[in-house]
Image (spheres, rainbow, N blue to C red):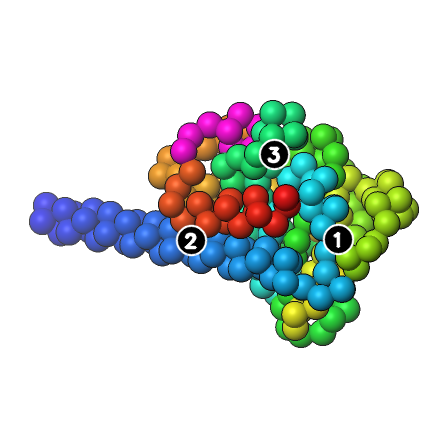
């Protein structure tokens, strides 16, 4: 009987430890994503055009996507996304954690990893975030976004793409194709962040619940970046 109780206690302790580790990882992702957004403001002329940031319905950031995992098919990037409330016209609401996997693309800027920024430009692109999985370039029209402070909003990429995608490596931003990559809600990370199971729709569309402390800096930085 004692051995059974010890085994149960050991399992519970391991479960609590694993959950705490995940919470720390989620907090790190949110902090790193905030830093990437801050760098958008400081970026030189090769940065993401400010007007696209202002017009975006949702903004997603995935820090340190690993180059070594490309083409293998496993998850290779985890980050966060937040959407404007009130039909895409209001302030950004509680963030939802996301995961990027699959696809086959290279980092034109070199390096073993790159930070990925995704701008969701249309109402339909917001809806894709509510699905269990969306494949970029198949379920949603995605294109590498133009760079430069004075880039025209009338380029072909912005006229036809629902989602504009960028990568940053070694301090420089460039448009990148994520065709074939799959994007999905990171449900375990959301549970770790909000301390209970929560659906992406509750966060991105309904704006339910208070914003946890680890996510507050991300939202504050996002608001200042997209003004």
Q: Nearer the viewer, mark 2 or mark 1?
A: 1
N-term-proximal mark, 1 vs 3:
1
Checking the image for residue 27, the label placed there is 2
Most common SS among magenta residues:
loop
Is residue 209 shown left or right of residue 92? left
Quarter of the image for residue 122 reads top right
Question: Is residue 104 visible from the viewing direction of this image?
Answer: no
Quarter of the figure with the N terminus:
top left
Is residue 11 shown left or right of residue 49? left
Rendered residue at 38%/55% (across/down): 24
Percent of width and height locating residue 53: 69, 46
Q: Residue furthest left?
A: 2
Mark 2 neighbour density, 10 Å: few (under 14) some (14–19) many (20 or more): some
> Which span is picked out in magenta?
203-210
Identify the secondary structure beneath mark 2. Answer: helix
Measure how far apart labels 3 and 2 are at the Cα level: 22 Å
């Amino acid at each position: 009987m004692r051995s059974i109780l010890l085994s149960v206690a050991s399992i519970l302790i391991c479960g609590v430890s694993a959950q705490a580790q995940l919470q720390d990882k989620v907090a790190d992702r949110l902090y790193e994503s905030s830093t990437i957004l801050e760098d958008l403001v400081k970026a030189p002329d090769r940065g993401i055009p400010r007007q696209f940031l202002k017009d975006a319905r949702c903004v997603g950031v995935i820090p340190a996507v690993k180059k070594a995992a490309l083409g293998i098919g496993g998850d290779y990037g985890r980050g966060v996304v937040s959407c404007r409330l009130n039909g895409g016209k209001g302030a950004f609401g509680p963030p939802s954690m996301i995961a990027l996997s699959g696809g086959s693309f290279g980092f034109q800027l070199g390096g073993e990893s790159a930070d990925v920024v995704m701008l969701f430009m249309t109402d339909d692109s917001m809806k894709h975030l509510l699905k269990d999985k969306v494949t970029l370039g198949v379920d949603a029209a995605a294109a590498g976004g133009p760079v430069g402070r004075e880039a025209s909003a009338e380029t072909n990429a912005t006229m036809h793409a629902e989602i504009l995608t960028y990568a940053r490596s070694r301090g420089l931003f460039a448009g990148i194709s994520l065709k074939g990559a799959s994007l999905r809600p990171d449900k375990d990370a959301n549970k770790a962040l909000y301390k209970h199971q929560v659906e992406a729709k509750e966060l991105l569309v309904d704006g339910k619940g208070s914003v946890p402390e680890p996510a507050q800096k991300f939202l504050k930085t996002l608001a200042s970046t997209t003004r």
